[in-house]
Image (tube, grey):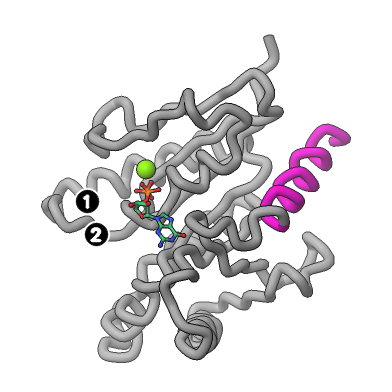
Amino acid sequence: MKKKPSLLIIGNSNVGKSSITRLLLPNPIKFKGKAGKKPGSTSLIKPISQPNLPYQIVDLPGFGYMKHSSRRREEHIKRQIIIHIENHNKDYFFGLVVLNALRIEDEINKYFIQNKDTIPLSFELINFLKEFGIPLLIIINKIDKVSHIDKRRIINLFLESAKEYDLSFIHLDNFKDVKEAELPFLEFSALKKTNLEKLRKIINTYQKNIKKV
Ligand SMILES: Nc1nc2c(ncn2[C@@H]2O[C@H](COP(=O)(O)OP(=O)(O)O)[C@@H](O)[C@H]2O)c(=O)[nH]1
Ligand SMILES: [Mg+2]
């Protein structure tokens, strides 16, 4: 049997990767999530596949630091992710980089505004994935938790800071062509299902394109 193409869902712990996965599955009841599994163990990379889903989903941790793990462990996980993408980037027809809207300002303040020698790990991750030519969508999740005015401020800060790292983003609504230099982003809420139809649509578009190649 031919292996299904893979959808990458990548982001730090707790950003909403499992919640988004559940929204995409034809049979979410069967999916228990990966809660409790230790990142860095051999079960780190385990594709989720269902009969009525034309692709499989691979959920990976981001480059970020987690509350309860040591720096050494973090570095180990980061290395594993790098090796996985280096070896398997061809399997992926599309990647969702999931960010937590509530964490963006902190990360940019700490690693960009206050310290010009560091790089916010989200930008580092996006640039890393971009190098391999995996088409990407940046999902700014948990948007239900921020007010309209905060949302605008957070997204503006994100877009402006990204320029310093040679990244430019465009709202998915204005995104027309894969060959554009900009990467599309979408504000999202897995809880409220905000923009879920837009997400489904773009995944389907990429998944169909791969078939023609
Ligand atoms: N308010 C809100 N909570 C969310 C959203 N997405 C996920 N969560 C919650 O955030 C927590 C972590 O979500 P999960 O999907 O397990 O994140 P993961 O660690 O990236 O897989 C859970 O309690 C979810 O219910 C969202 O869009 N809005
Ligand atoms: Mg999870």
Q: Which of the image's four quarters has the C terminus?
A: top right
The residues colored magenta run: 198-213
Q: In this rendering, which labeled residue sits more in front, label 2 or label 1?
A: 2
Q: Work out which residue is located at the far right of the displayed protein and give it.
A: 212
In the drawing, does residue 133 fall left or right of residue 31?
right
Q: Amino acid at mark 1?
A: Glu
Q: Quadrant of ligand 2?
A: top left
- Taking the spot 74% from the left edge, 52% from the top edge, the residue there is 202
Q: Which mark is residue 112?
A: none
Does the magenta portion include 19?
no
- Taking the spot 32% from the left edge, 45% from the top edge, the residue there is 79
156, 164: nearer the viewer: 156
Judged by its main secondary structure, the magenta piece is helix
- Taking the spot 57% from the left edge, 69% from the top edge, the residue there is 187
Mark 2 or mark 1: name the one nearer the start of the chain: 2
Q: Amino acid at mark 2?
A: Tyr
Cβ atoms under marks 2 and 1 closer than 8 Å = yes
In the drawing, does residue 2 fall left or right of residue 189?
right
- Taking the spot 11% from the left edge, 52% from the top edge, the residue there is 70
Q: Which mark is residue 74?
A: 1
Does the magenta portion include 200?
yes
38, 40: nearer the viewer: 38
In the drawing, does residue 15 fall left or right of residue 37?
right
Residue 74 x/y as whole percent: 22, 51
112, 174: nearer the viewer: 174
Q: Work out which residue is located at the far front of the displayed protein and give it.
A: 192
Is the residue 199 above or below the residue 79 in the image? below
The residue to which callout 2 is attached is 65
Is the residue 54 above or below the residue 141 in the image? above
Helix, strand or loop status at disc 1: helix
